[in-house]
Amino acid sequence: MSERLATEPQSARDREKRVRRQVLEPDTLRALLPLRASVVARSSTKPAARDREREFAAVSAAYAHAVAAPDEFSGNIKVITLDSLAWSVPLLAPDDPEAVARYLGHQDFPYRAIAQTREAGIGGVMIDIGANIGRMSIPRVLLGDATLAYCIEPDPLNYACLVRNIRDNGLAGLVLADQLALGATSGTVRLERAKSPGGHRVLGEGMTTRRETVEVPIATLDAWIDRAGIDLDDVRFVKLDVQGGEVDVLAGASRVLACRHIAWQIEVDAERLSKRRLDVEDLFALLRRHFTHFVDLNRFASGSRLRSVTDLAEALAYVTEPGAGGTDVLFFSLLEPASRE
């Protein structure tokens, strides 16, 4: 017994080293991005990109308006330089210097998550649901992880920054953004505006709030895919982060979920789900039906890195603990059993 215990820590360290060698270091991606940015931006001047942007503007009135009126929210937008990119960020309290400094100090690109999702999410078209200002989709396009990205963001100010970030960095026709919410139905819905630009959420039926709200259009993902003219055979990766509304989005995405070649990065947050009178099991039940495996992107997660969806409740039990917060999880399907090393 003592010999076995003595070897286990070393074995765990060896497994960690092997996993780290398989995942590109985030700092490598950060160093690559400025070198790739100018080359990728040149692609936006090609006829195919120009045609794609023109066709998208014809079906997205929001995009056409944002392009025509780039300074509409200028009083609430600050432009900074972020890893060589001109980056517009939304300021919800532009007259509060401390709040502005605090928010600007948290601006970065999610290089670690990009590196972690490369196994199943690299290549082809990306759909970014809850795109915010483009911090996930824009660097993925610049690094070559996605050949084209479609972004969906409901908040007007976030959306204005998103379109500016696309166009100011020469990505017109390579990153295309629409302003709406996604859910289980179509129509209009109230969006609750939070204290931080990343906290806005769609209010479900019967939900009340004392915060500012704004009405935004809502559609199912399946219907929006049709309207945007996206060929699902080209899609490889979907990122879903909608502040507790994930179940509703998945309920309106049956045709996309039927495409088993598409990997999804989904936020799992028990507290946010509970505010919509949902349990994490409501989300897990949907995910078990459509995927075979997952990787918890939480760097402190324990257990095997690659796991079967049958292990969801056990592996993510920690998110139900008070104050635990959420985690991003990569979901995908495999035809053959995979090693759990």
Image (cartoon, rainbow, N blue to C red):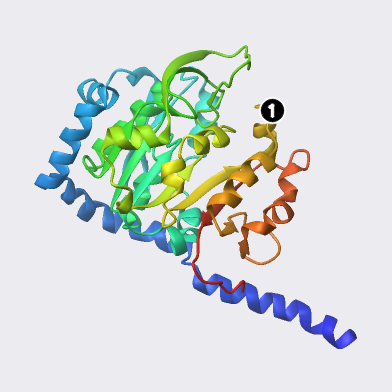
Where is the N terminus found, in terms of image quarters? bottom right
Q: Give the residue at x 65% y 33%.
A: 273
Q: Residue furthest right?
A: 1
Between 300 and 86, the one nearer to me in the picture? 300
Residue 160 sits in which quadrant? Answer: top left
Q: Is residue 135 visible from the viewing direction of this image?
A: no
| Kind of residue indicated by mark 1 | Arg
For residue 207, above or below residue 232: above
Q: Return the x and y of residue 168 as percentages of the image width and height.
A: 25, 37
Q: Is residue 75 at least partly visible in the picture?
A: yes
Using the image, determine if residue 20 lies above or below residue 123. below
Q: Which residue is mark 1?
A: 277
What is the x, y in percent for residue 282? Answer: 66, 39
Position of 186 compared to 71: left or right? right
Looking at the image, the residue that sits furthest to the left is: 47
Foreground residue among 26 and 190:
190
Residue 269 position in % (x across, y down): 64, 40
Residue at x 57%, y 36% (from the top left corner): 247
How packed mark 1 is, by other alpha carbons closer than 10 Å (few <14, some 14-19, many 20 or more), is few
The quarter holding residue 13 reads bottom right
Question: Which element carries disc 1, helix, strand or loop?
Answer: loop
Residue 194 position in % (x across, y down): 56, 23
Residue at the image position 62 percent from the left and 63 percent from the top: 307
Please indicate whether residue 216 sits to the left or right of residue 165 in the image: right
